[in-house]
Amino acid sequence: MDYENLLFEIDDGIAIVTINRPKVLNALNGATLTELRATFKRVADDPNIKCAILTGSGEKSFVAGADINEISTKNAVTGVEFALNGQSVSNQIQHCGKPIIAAVNGFALGGGCEIAMACHLRFASEKARFGQPEVNLGIIPGYGGTQRLARLVGAGRALELCISGNMINAQEAYRIGLVNQLYSPEELLPKTKEFCKTVMSKGPKAVSFVLHAVNRGMEMPLADALRLEAHLFGLVCATDDMKEGTAAFMEKREAKFTGK
């Protein structure tokens, strides 16, 4: 498909999705969300894509937030529609079935922080900044920020960020568990690709089942989540990859997984 607000490339099985609106610090408008939805459906459906990286264009910003011009026109009814639309894109990323890593190269504020949190992991430049500043505009996070942030860093820290509107640097985001890895700006994308290569060397079915177990399990009571894990463990035991992986271990050789 043709993109107006994204750049898309596939590099040896890794889809690299770049939000490309640098003049507005890659702010998310409706058109960009529509393109993201279509793109991550493509990532999910294309068997040649094994992993994806989401990043922002330029050196300043990952995504600086949602488009304030669009937000300013919303009312009680259209505001709900606006939030649900953003949440549906976040949910599509989270439940893509393939590892999605946010390479946060700059500001990740508001909707940008929310989109980053929908990704399975967040690798950040040391110059990145994070925050949920919506209260400064008299509104609240609407793309999942109040829920995903609390699940990632705990309710107390999530409330502190959401009710103060304060921005934190990459080092603090790493300290509280919002960010998985920190890199120099020059290292960010190469190191993220390197991690993708590591994940892609593992059993594809197993990786997909881990994502499913964690994502769905977080929404369940522990007893139900454990039953889900056991069910998925049983399913993966019936795969060719399981037979290959265990045989390779016992034969002291590298496994050759096929995703079957």
Image (spheres, rainbow, N blue to C red):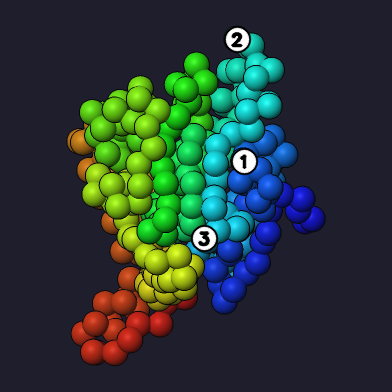
Residue drawn at point x = 68 percent, y = 47 percent:
23
Question: Could you tell me residue 213's position as x and y percent?
Answer: 33, 48
Q: What residue is disc 2 on?
A: 76
Residue at (46% x, 70% y) in the render: 186
Amino acid type for the residue under numbered disc 2: Ala
Say left or right for 36 vs 106.
Answer: right
Label 2 packing within 10 angstroms: few (<14), some (14-19), many (20+): few
Residue 39, position as x, y percentages in the image: 65, 52
Depicted 50 relative to depicted 174: above or below: below
Helix, strand or loop at label 2? It is helix
Tell me the CA gap for discs 2 and 3: 35 Å
Judging by the rendered image, the residue that carries numbered circle 3 is 53
Q: Which residue is mark 1?
A: 27
Q: Assess whether mark 1 and mark 2 are in contact (beta carbons under 8 angstroms).
A: no
Question: Residue 210's quadrant in the figure?
Answer: bottom left
Residue located farthest toward the right when viewing the structure as drawn:
2
- How busy is the neighbourhood of tag 3: few (under 14 within 10 Å), some, or many (20 plus)? many
- Kind of residue indicated by mark 1: Ala
> How far is disc 3 from disc 1 in space, using C-alphas?
18 Å
Element type at mark 1: loop
